[in-house]
Image: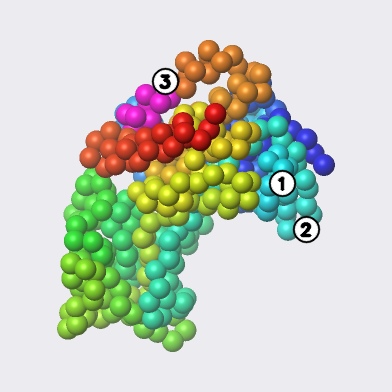
Amino acid sequence: MIEVELAIVGAGPAGLSAAIEARRAGAEVLLIDENSRPGGQLFKQIHKFFGSRAHKAGTRGMNIGTELLRESKELGIKTWLKGEVCGIEDGHKLWVVIDRNRSEFVKAKKIILATGATENAVSFPGWDLPGVMGAGAAQTMINVHRVLPGRKVIMLGSGNVGVIVAYQLLQAGAEVVAILEAAPKLGGYGVHTAKVARAGVPLYVSHTIKRAFGTDRVEAVEIVELDEQFKQITGTERTLEVDTICIATGLTPLTELAWLAGCKFNYIPALGGHLPIHDHKMRSTQPDIFIAGDISGIEEASTAMEEGRLAGINAACELGYITQEEAENRSREIWDSLNSLRSGYFGQKRRDSKDLMLQKGKEVIK
């Protein structure tokens, strides 16, 4: 069995940020990720962040990822890649399968879960044909592996992921035949939606996919209009020639390890569903387990990094590397930054939902 002071599961923006803060304080850190490269979603994000300079505005996600990796390397953070954490026992012991051919038990004094989220699926006749994929999969193909998933693409979902990936598909040389949105209005930020609109991509609200056609792959798709109750309106069907269907219908937090660890949960639909309850330190109801990023609620990479910093600082404090006063002062600064990120038309709903979670945390975490 391997013993460490702090084990962090997930090397995306939240996990890397947590590892950097804790290691800077002096803690012994083991960072574990199931992928072959750390960085998570950041290396898919070739677009520039926006907001304030403090939140990396004007910097591309992939460049932010490169900077975080540089910092983690300089700090000497021990990292296990291709390591899948399959369970947590006794609140401290992680069962890690490495490279699918060996396993290790890791006993950690503190654990930070930064496991991220998974894409939601939508089923319809033909949804199992080759060519139907999540928008994140398409983004990985074009931005990481430089492979075009298809020539004629339809996007289901007009949130930020849908419109950003649609625009990146255009940049990669694909034709985006249309973007569909089941709701009566578009869901993404105007700055992203405007790009695809200016490029001439048709945007259909109150529409969804009825079925996909094809033998060995997607060859066409039938779309249909929806009424106010989201029921299909007979007679409004249209068939479009496509070879790829991308689904961008939201994300679900990856919370399995938190369930296994015995963390208590609360249900908050606006943040993705059932979420581990946490306090202002990002500590769960299991006193030695912290959470950060999408596992605490679906938001942006910017908020994931700030939550990672919070978790890393407070875990280091509980390990004795930062004084309580310093941890509280730095946490206040980060909370000011998080509240700024959650301001505005889109962010306020997330802020209200987070406030509900923190209130619940006060009630159950002592």
Q: CA distance from mark 1 to mark 2?
A: 21 Å
Going 45% across and 58% down the picture, which residue do you hit?
A: 119
**Magenta stretch: includes residue 306:** no
Q: Secondary structure at mark 3?
A: helix
Q: Position of residue 47 (x, y in %)?
A: 36, 44
Q: Position of residue 156 (x, y in %)?
A: 32, 65
Foreground residue among 308 and 64: 308
Going 30% across and 78% down the picture, which residue do you hit?
A: 210
Compared to residue 94, the image places residue 306 above or below, namely above
Foreground residue among 141 and 157: 157
Residues marked 3 and 1 touching at CB (< 8 Å) = no
Q: CA distance from mark 3 to mark 1?
A: 34 Å
Count neighbours of disc 3 (C-alpha within 10 A) and say few if under 14, some if 14 to 19, many if 20 or more.
Answer: few
Q: Residue furthest right?
A: 1
In the rendered image, which residue does mark 3 sit on?
333
> Which is the main secondary structure of the residues drawn in magenta?
helix
Closer to us: mark 3 or mark 1? 1
Mark 3 or mark 1: which comes first in sequence? 1
Closer to us: mark 3 or mark 2? 3
Closer to us: mark 1 or mark 2? 1
Mark 1 or mark 2: which comes first in sequence? 1
The magenta region covers: 333-341
Going 38% across and 66% down the picture, which residue do you hit?
A: 246
What is the tally of numbered marks visible in this picture? 3
Residue 330 can be seen, yes or no = yes
Mark 3 or mark 2: which comes first in sequence? 2
* Picture disc at residue 89: 1
* Picture disc at residue 101: 2
Compared to residue 25, the image places residue 265 above or below, namely below
Count neighbours of disc 1 (C-alpha within 10 A) and say few if under 14, some if 14 to 19, many if 20 or more.
Answer: few
